[in-house]
Amino acid sequence: MRIGLAIDAACDLSPAFMQQHDIAVMPITVKVDGQVFLDDRKPAELQRFIDLRLGSRSHSAETEPCPVEEVQKLFLDKLVLEQDCVFCLTITATRSPINEHVNRASFVILKNYRQAREAASIPGPFMMRVIDTRNIFAGAAPAVYEATRMIAAGDTPAAIRERLLYIANNSYGYMLPRDLYYLRARAKKKNDRSVSLFSAMLGSALDIKPLLRCFRGETGPVGKVRGFEQGAEALFGYAAQRVRAGLLVPLVCVSYGGDLAVLTHLPGYAGLRAACEEHGVELMEAPMSITGMVNVGEGAVTLGLAAEEHDAEF
């Protein structure tokens, strides 16, 4: 059985990994300051967004997740012909309507795929499974990574689905923003009260950065640090501890809203890399999606891993 993967563009993964596993992308349209971007995780469009240096204006951006009709088209024109089963992984349904769009599209796809496959002389049924990773950005990576491992091992769709639901429930996504004013402005744009004006003003005045966590679809602060670099050191140090304690998936994904070369120079990153190498864990560096950058600001770091339930200590 041919089993493939599709993700929404806000799932942060490295381009090389996506190409290696032929992962399809359900794009997001981003409109900001008169410019329109198709966030499909392609490097050229991502670089165009960065080069335009929209900066603080991006907080007013409008984002449009892949419409139901476009999801249907992607599947009926392409994926039902190339695969016999496709797992669609999306960022948490609590933060984006894309999971709902894909679920709605699946009814039409599963009703009409036979005609497309018969016209191409492809025998047999087609299956489609939608998985809510219950996380955001780099936090979605462990479930996608685990799916590729299980597909390569020849596991059944039923076994893969059960395992991915477990990994989604035990995935942790962390975020360290650079600009609290930006984060507060974007939150206000989306009617999200998670970052108040007072905390943004106080944090900026004292250079205090929050460490935010997404776990099982819920996002909130789990710590505060003085300065972005100290925050990075705390976050990478925590991740190294989790690597040494044992992960459910041998992956730590780190995404950055800008030039990935910056990661190497952040405090604590060398220690995280060493811990991953010592314990056979892949350290994946991923460019943050355009959608991610307009939501949390350029220069932010997100980190994802899957582990047994625990309390973060910062």
Image: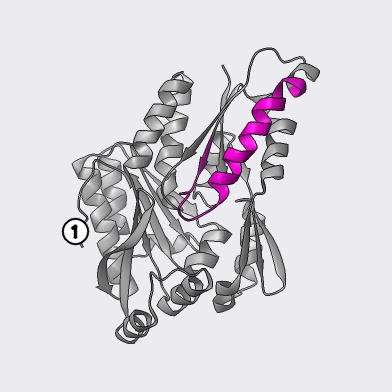
| Residue 269 point in image, percent of width and height | 32, 58
Viewer-nearest residue: 106 or 301: 106
Residue located 25% across and 44% down the image: 243
Callout 1 secondary element: loop
Q: Which residue is mark 1?
A: 313
Can residue 8 be seen here?
no
| Residue 244 point in image, percent of width and height | 20, 44
Viewer-nearest residue: 301 or 136: 136
From the viewer's perspective, is residue 21 above or below residue 126? below
| Amino acid at pointer 1 | Glu
Q: Tell me the quarter of the picture where residue 236 sits.
A: bottom left
From the viewer's perspective, is residue 98 above or below residue 300? above
Q: Does the magenta portion include 261?
A: no
Q: Is residue 278 left or right of residue 288?
A: left
Quarter holding the N terminus?
A: top right
Quarter holding the C terminus?
A: bottom left
Can residue 28 be seen here?
yes
Which region of the structure is painted magenta? Answer: 88-116
Q: Does the magenta portion include 93?
A: yes
From the viewer's perspective, is residue 235 above or below residue 87? below
| Residue 182 point in image, percent of width and height | 47, 76
Q: Is residue 197 left or right of residue 103?
A: left
Q: Is residue 66 left or right of residue 166?
A: right
Residue located 57% across and 60% down the image: 290
Q: Is residue 113 left or right of residue 236?
A: right
Viewer-nearest residue: 258 or 208: 208
Q: Taken as a whole, is the magenta stretch helix, strand or loop?
A: helix
Q: Tell me the quarter of the picture where residue 223 sits.
A: bottom left
Q: Residues within 10 Å of mark 1 (few under 14, many from 20)?
A: few
From the viewer's perspective, is residue 99 above or below residue 289? above
Residue located 24% across and 57% down the image: 237
